[in-house]
Amino acid sequence: MHRQFDDLMLGSIELFCLAGELGGFTAAATAAGVTPAAVSRSVARLEARLGVRLFVRSTRQIRLTDAGRVYMEQCRQALTQFADAERMASGQEAQLSGRLRISAPTTYAHYRLLPALPAFHREHPGIRLDLHISNRNIGFADEAFDLAIRVRAPVDSSLIVRHLEDSALVVVAAPAYLAAHGVPRTLADLAGHECIQFDLPSSGRRIPWLFRQDGADVEFEAESSYTVSEDVLGGVTLARAGAGLFQAYRFVVQEYLESGSLVEVLADFGGRSRPYNLLYPHSRFVPPRVRAFIDFLTARVAATP
């Protein structure tokens, strides 16, 4: 088999990734124990091979080009897989290390994912967690994420979808709002209330409220003086401030229900939920650190009341 990469080229890739991560040739040289000139030569060697510029250089700083950023993410992922393969071959797979890049939406991150991570870190202290907390849909190929948590599973044959849980929905309001405007008893009553809305950041489409009435699934859409986008937790804050009714995940508002700062309404029309899914690229080789996190999170969710 013809060799595509010699030792010099692999070393150049490692130095390039260091320079991209640390933001400079001197910093990369210090970390690697070589000279800044050696780092510069390595980057120039890669740029000549690829025919593209990887860094924009000035007298004060360097920064990755768009092509350089994509190339670095892919190279860093490949180098991590090399390290994982070596540990597995040498029987050291129990000592997991490397970077784990996870993307999660704000609600699930704050109330499910982030509280669980210290326990995972205690089990695997060598794994560095890189967290992207946003409702934006990320691209696995372009941004080199290992895992993502999303409500809507994309139609993409290159991704594996693992169902995590179905999260119950409830309609809540502050006691002061209900005292001033009355408690809705039927779905028809919602027409006379402020029903705080949330727009999907990916499409701008308004998310309908979900109910179950007489055994049938029902969707409800209403106009409101308040519309929130990007961060659904803004709707919860508005409801707590007395702005109106809001439909949220029970796990998000449970502490407020227990303290009495929010009250559940229309419980007779409840029973609906939305799914949360774990997504990761379909590959013959799943790095051990990724497999360890998948097993950890699915077990953690299964044990959550």
Image: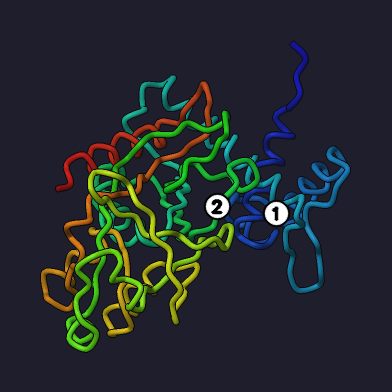
Q: Residues within 10 Å of mark 1 (few under 14, many from 20)?
A: some
Q: Which residue is mark 2?
A: 137
Drawn side of residue 289 relative to residue 38, left or right: left
- How was the colour assigned to the protein in this rendering? rainbow
Q: Going by the image, does 175 lie left or right of 274?
A: left
Residue 43 place in picture, x, y as percent: 77, 48
Mark earlier in primary sequence (2, 1) = 1
283 over 54 or under it: above or below: above
How dense is the environment of label 2, judged by Cα within 10 Å: few (below 14), some, or many (20 and up)?
some
- Image height check: is 274 above or below 88? below
Q: Nearer the viewer, residue 245 or 80?
A: 245
Tell me the quadrant of the picture where the N terminus can be found.
top right
Q: Is residue 249 above or below residue 289?
A: below
Q: Camera-side residue: 277 or 96?
A: 277
**Residue under numbered circle 1:** 35
Query: Is disc 1 placed on a helix, strand or loop?
Result: loop
Between disc 2 and disc 1, the foreground one is 2
The three-letter amino acid code for the residue at tag 1 is: Thr
Check if mark 2's residue and mark 1's residue have beta carbons within 8 Å: no
Report how far apart the C-alphas of labels 2 and 1 lie in the structure.
40 Å
Q: Left of 129 or right of it: where is 43? A: right
Q: Residue at x 82, y 42 (%)?
A: 45
Residue 64: give x, y in percent of width and height: 73, 58
Q: Nearer the viewer, residue 181 or 297?
A: 181
Q: What label does residue 284 carry, if any? A: none
Query: In the image, what residue occupies the spot 45% across and 60% down?
Result: 207
